[in-house]
Amino acid sequence: MPGAAVLATGAALKSGCGLVTLHSTPRALQAAANNFPSAILSEDREKYLSTPPEDFGKYSAVAAGPGLGIKENPGLRFSEVLRRARNEAIPMVLDADAITWLSQIPERWSLIPEGSVLTPHLGELRRLLGEDNEGALESKVKEFCKQTRSVLVWKGYHTRVFTPDGECRQNTSGGPGLAKGGSGDVLTGLIGGLLARGYSPEDAAALGVWIHGYAADMLTADKTAEAFNSRDLIDSLYCGFYKLYNE
């Protein structure tokens, strides 16, 4: 799904960070070049992620998961990406197929770099923690954050941000217009860019969720919730920053 990687890249470019590199397949890189020419391109010549980008240690943050295709490639060397990020103390944003990969074997949780942010929706969260009961899920989320020293964004109605210290922040922006394909990829890129700017994982997650939701609120007021898409969301992220600067 090259579009997912392109959307995450576009959102990162709107986060205020200096440089954004997309490491992906030729098809995704071509799409990124056509849509976001200011992105730096790092090519993996296989049809799936087979090697981490060169000079891995130079990155301030890494976002991974959108369009990765875990199911299509059981031999994916994603563990190497996690190990290198952990060894270099690089925080990550983990979404979509990255969360699916972590869900397959709980022992993989130990590879999550400290200070990372995971952004699952309810279905992904149930698979990750092996818990279908929504009432019991919250306590498991808190245990997971404490164990992995990571932040978890539980996406949905009034998205919640859980921290390793047991804090829970509830978002107040956003609406049903975000329940569309690609919205989560935009959030992943935005939080990744905020991490790269130096925000703490807790603040990058909370700020990213709020800006993402506020952009959706502005689009809903202008276009209705039905008629905007994830690309529109990228182009409206500035509304959240503008609101913050003028409050």
Image (tube, helix red, strand yellow):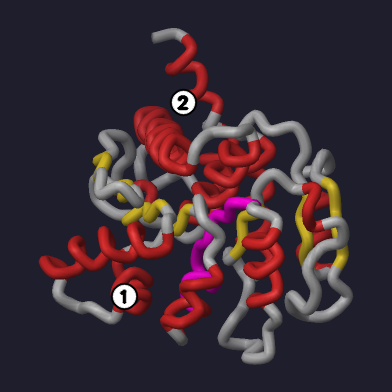
48 horizontally vs 43: left or right = left
20 horizontally vs 127: left or right = right
In the picture, the quarter occupied by the C terminus is top left
Residue name at image x 35 percent, y 58 percent: 145
Q: Is residue 145 magenta?
A: no
Sequence-first disc among 1 and 2: 1
Task: From the image, state whether disc 1 or disc 2 is nearer to you.
Answer: 1
Label placed on residue 151: none
Above or below: residue 205 compared with residue 101: above
Per the rendered image, the range of residues in magenta is 90-100
| Residue 130 seen anywhere in this rendered image of the structure | yes
Above or below: residue 57 compared with residue 216: below
- The spot of residue 17 in percent (x, y) is 68, 33
- The spot of residue 236 in percent (x, y) is 53, 31
Q: Is residue 98 magenta?
A: yes
Residue name at image x 52 percent, y 40 percent: 233
| Nearer the observer, 47 or 55 | 55
In the picture, the quarter occupied by the N terminus is bottom right
Above or below: residue 140 compared with residue 186: below
Residue name at image x 50 percent, y 17 percent: 242
* Residue at the limit of the structure toward the left, as seen here: 135
Q: Residues within 10 Å of mark 1 (few under 14, many from 20)?
A: some
* Residue at the limit of the structure toward the top, as seen here: 246
How far apart are the alpha carbons under marks 1 and 2?
A: 32 Å
236 horizontally vs 78: left or right = left
Q: Residues within 10 Å of mark 2 (few under 14, many from 20)?
A: many
Label placed on residue 240: 2
| Nearer the observer, 68 or 143 | 143
Q: Which residue does the numbered mark 1 point to in the structure image?
A: 129
Name the image quarter holding residue 124. Answer: bottom left
Residue name at image x 14 percent, y 75 percent: 133
- The spot of residue 22 in percent (x, y) is 76, 55
